[in-house]
Amino acid sequence: MHTHETRLDALRKQLVKDGLDGFVIPISDEHMSEYVGTYAQRLEWLTGFGGSAGTAVVLADEAAIFVDGRYTLQVCDQVDGKLWSYQSVPQTSVAAWLGEHAPKGAKIGYDAWLHGKGWAEEAAKALQVRGATLVPVSANPVDAVWQDQPMPSLAPAVPHADEHAGKSAHEKRAEVAEWLGAKGLDAAVVSALDSVAWLLNIRGADVDRTPVALSYVIAHADGTADLFIAPEKVTPELTAHLGNAVRVQPREAFVPTLEQLKGRKVAVDPERAVAAIFHALEGAGAEVVAVTDPVVLPKAIKNPVEQAGHRAAQARDGAAIVRFLRWVSVEAPKGGVTELSAADRLQAFRAETGLLRDLSFDTISGAGPNGAVVHYRVSEETSRNLEPNSVYLVDSGGQYLDGTTDITRTVWVGPDAPPAEVKDRFTRVLKGHIALARAVFPKGTAGSQLDSFARQFLWSAGLDYAHGTGHGVGSFLAVHEGPQRIAKASGGQAGTGQELLPGMILSNEPGYYKTGEYGIRIENLVLVERRDIAGAEGEFYGFETLTFAPIARDLVDMALLSAEERDWLNSYHTKVRSVLAPQLSDDDLAWLDAACAVL
């Protein structure tokens, strides 16, 4: 038996011991994080799947893995189809599948520290039809069979200076207290790691690519807070930074403290808090009010200091991107550049700024057909050469103290001219990118209302892409941050109904993917800003583009661009040159000049 078969077999034996007929394994941690620490990578350990979203279900005689459209190709490559059946979300769901496959009267286990309350209710309801039940486990059976499971990180939590945060933790706690008071609530549970980090102005190194510290907060209406964190992570600097109004307690004290809130009105966010938190509060007799975490919106609306920091980070990052793109243009056509060596080179250029703290996610370095895998993650096994006369897509970002970046560029590796089809698709993606960048919209507009701006030119040619057009981005925090997003409005996706407000940062990233051949994506970050329009009736907004790096001119079919679009691209490139030229010299500067030449 190979590794993953042995692991599945071991888990099934453990389920028998635990008196369970099945178990659900999500990619999640106790904070509902998108990216999780290595200790919480249970799905990857069990199945081999390395994407950042997915769930598996193990029954005695069958097992299934559930992923969305981003991972359709990846799951087939990484997960053994003899052991697991592939299920597509949203066409089906874990709950719906359990409702059809769970044995009559079965006990299906789940870890209430890894799932949301809504999910648990939906799954329990689906199982009811089969006379089966959903059972919260006291110990996760995967952990019981995962012999060399890493420990959660004990890296110290560190203060995040006001010069970068733009607002003190004291002010932020006071605002939450005011919000609690206005709603007649006693306390709020803050369990999302980036919310904890933002509220207390602390950062950490517990999750790859996201500078957060594993911890929980209970914020009180009097402006004080309790922080639950492993004592090994607490330094004298952290204690001094937090001050007297924040009581620091070990992580184990979290549930007992929740249980002391009997009779109190407590705000908990069902999107961001696991089911176990609701169970603890409800079991203790607290009055639970399901409401969005009060930190989410203030965190999304960047203050002037955060905005200025982001611009500085983008200018620094853009210069590293230019050095990389020039390197690719010289080295790739010779052969011998691989997806891995390119990603390493890009990280080195970023690191040479002297200010890079981490990448903001694993670089998506996709040559030719790998570029068509939307959330491709390059590995030793999959790394391809950047072949002469092919498309190369690179989506990457950096974490800097003053900002988090995320940029995608698609280039043609010569020496021959790109084919007409590739130029046509690239230009349609570019036209969508420009339409969104130039959009002007009234106050109250949600991201879902802007999504088709970016898709219209693909749609008119009978084409589309299977991912959202834009996500929020944090300030030296999570590269994917809610509540705002630009995507097709769908019942299951949070955030598409959130109105866009000045100060929010989003990505603008339409794409096109031809399976087995190539992928195209053009991504910049944008800031929502007020627009003064003569004679405007009411408040109107638009976007300031924050990302500066050339867009591949040799992939543009000029015949498809309108005069306004051409003007936008030329003025964008003029700005790119003015922002980046002071940081570059010699061959890099000459390359930039050519890449930004007027079309």
Image: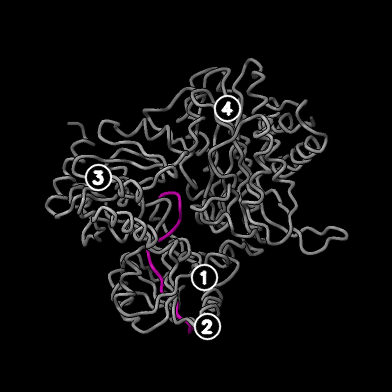
Q: Residues within 10 Å of mark 3 (few under 14, many from 20)?
A: many
Q: Label 1, label 4: how many angstroms apart (C-alpha)?
A: 45 Å
Which range is magenta? 208-222
Whether residue 39 appears in this view of the structure is yes
Image disc number at residue 328? 4
Q: Is residue 156 left or right of residue 420?
A: left
Q: Residues within 10 Å of mark 4 (few under 14, many from 20)?
A: many
| Tag 1: amino acid | Pro
If you read the primary sequence from the N terminus, does the residue marked by circle 1 or circle 4 appear first? 1
Q: Could you tell me which secondary element the residue under label 2 belongs to?
A: helix
Mark 2 or 3: the one toward you:
3
What residue is disc 3 on?
58
Mark 1 or 4: the one toward you:
1
| Tag 3: amino acid | Val
| Tag 4: amino acid | Val
What residue is disc 1 on?
294
Q: Residues within 10 Å of mark 2 (few under 14, many from 20)?
A: some
What residue is disc 2 on?
181
Q: Nearer the viewer, residue 487 or 347?
A: 487
Q: Could you tell me which secondary element the residue under label 1 belongs to?
A: loop
Q: Residue at x 58, y 18 (%)?
A: 389
| Tag 2: amino acid | Gly
Q: Which quarter shows the N terminus?
A: top left
If you read the primary sequence from the N terminus, does the residue marked by circle 1 or circle 2 appear first? 2
Asked whether the beta carbons under mark 2 and mark 3 sit within 8 Å of each other, the answer is no
